[in-house]
Image: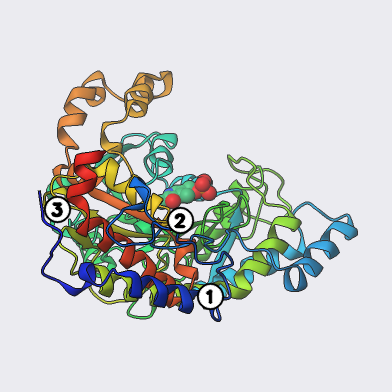
Amino acid sequence: MIGTTVGNGTANGVGRRAFIKAAGAATAGAAFTQAPFNVRAGTGDAGVPALLGGGKAHPGGWPKWPRWIPETDESGLLKVMRSGVWSRAGVVSEFERRWAEAMGAKRCLAVVNGTNALITALAQLDVGAGDEVILPPYTFIATPQSILMNGAIPVFCDIDPATYQLDPKKIEAKITPRTRAILPVHILGLPADMTAIMAIAKKHNLIVVEDACQAWMAEINGKKCGTFGNAGCYSFQNSKNMAIGEGGAIVSDDGAFMDRCHSYHNYGNAYGTAVGAVGGGTVMLGTKQRITEYQAAIGLAQLARLGEESARRHENAEYLKGKVKDIPGIVPYEFSPGVTRAAFHLFPFRYKKEAFGGLPFGTFLKALSAEGVPCSSGYGPLNKGQYVKHAFATKNFRRMYAPADLDYAAWLERTRCPENDLLCQEAVWLSQSLLLAEKADMDGIADAIGKIHANAGKLAKEK
Ligand SMILES: *Cc1c(COP(=O)(O)O)cnc(C)c1O
């Protein structure tokens, strides 16, 4: 058990005065926070965690997501609705031009979602049966599924424990004669080390598809995530920092590849250089992944403020990191080399329970939520999922591979990722929308964590 005195100012700074100061600042000039400060009568002292009936360290009332601002957002959408042209046409093309421009890429294709952006990019780079694709395990399920959907085998490579991203130092040990591509993920919106990854890809002649589905506007040395490899993929799902509800995009500077992607997303109908003469009918294997005009109109409205929101998240995240990094047992993210902007789809830190008197991870999450700071645990280990076993058992895989290639136990052994296992047990996430609040709200988050640290002994005993 730890005592109530701790050797740093952050935890000790949680007193009634700190609450009142945070309350005043949060109320004055807070564009996003609406709720009044809410210390419950008679229980407002810092010595009683909210989980045990004390007042909250933060009043709640966080910015809502997604944002919809009728004055600026509705005219474009209404115009589309009233036109009766709802299927892919000029507004989608306009959105693609603007997205390519915002990312600094030559071309963009909008598709139905991020999952299908990945599936299409891999397919049109001819990644498929017999190929292995190296990817990190700390990601969303769509990443490995996009590889399996193309008939290729995902090979998980462990993460860097400081950045949570694919560790370039561990990639070469995973390369075999079958390795065809690397699929780095800029997970949580923090850029992967693309300088090192691209050097490895070049050396081994590998394709690189970036999963930038959480990394809109993130940058390494001023260059946008999604523009380093052969293709970059984005998601515009409802919870994402660039929210359309559903939607996705592929960007690339390779015109012939983008023509093939376009054809594939439109039933395989001829497009540009990909399949011979335009007007040649349906000339390649394809599916349908087109987004609608009204989705594009929503996208244009969101894109208009994405730059400003991204800058705000980055600034607030770095400020918050500075405030929590000295609380014992709280270990925030580190950036990969050269990062000039992160998207912060999530604000991540590790929780080390030893420094909190052994307070269990789950109780910490409950205590922090009770203090008015919504939070969650992160991903589970995707390198152990049953979905791979199922894929290996499908008819397609059994026809594509020899039985020895589909030995699930051997695959599990090959894709062990101990650093990721540990991260999955320790990572705490705060949602991107919290980072759109005011600086005083970041103080409130830090106060809440400090308060739990100072009272960890009490929480461990009573919960
Ligand atoms: C959201 C996400 C996807 C999939 O995007 P959808 O639009 O939901 O299909 C892929 N990869 C990562 C890392 C994501 O966060």
Residue 305 in view of the camera? yes
Nearer the observer, 254 or 430: 430
- Tag 1's secondary structure? helix
Q: Which residue is mark 2?
A: 213
- Labels 3, 1: front one: 1
Quadrant housing residue 208? bottom left
Q: Which mark identifies residue 27?
A: 1
**Residue type, numbered disc 1:** Thr
Q: Position of residue 6 (x, y in %)?
A: 13, 65
Q: Name the image colouring.
A: rainbow
Picture disc at residue 300: none
**Residue 377 position in % (x across, y down):** 33, 46
Q: Please report the residue visible at 26 percent of the width from the left and 32 percent of the height from the top.
A: 384
Gap between marks 2 and 3 measured at Cα = 23 Å
- Residues tagged 3 and 1 counted as in contact (Cβ below 8 A): no
**Element on which disc 2 rests:** loop
Label 2 within 8 A of ligand 1 by Cβ = yes
Q: Earlier in the sequence, mark 2 or mark 3?
A: 3
Q: CA distance from mark 1 to mark 2?
A: 34 Å
Q: Kindly indicate the quadrant of the structure image that contains residue 318.
A: bottom left
Question: Mark 2: which amino acid?
Answer: Cys
Label 1 or label 2, whichever lies nearer to me, is: 1
Few, some or many residues within 10 Å of mark 1 (<14, 14–19, 20+)? some
Q: Is residue 317 visible?
A: no
Q: Is residue 253 above or below residue 286?
A: below
Instruction: Kindly identify which residue carries mark 3.
Output: 170
- How many marks can you see? 3
The quadrant of the picture occupied by the C terminus is top left
Q: Is residue 300 above or below residue 270?
A: below
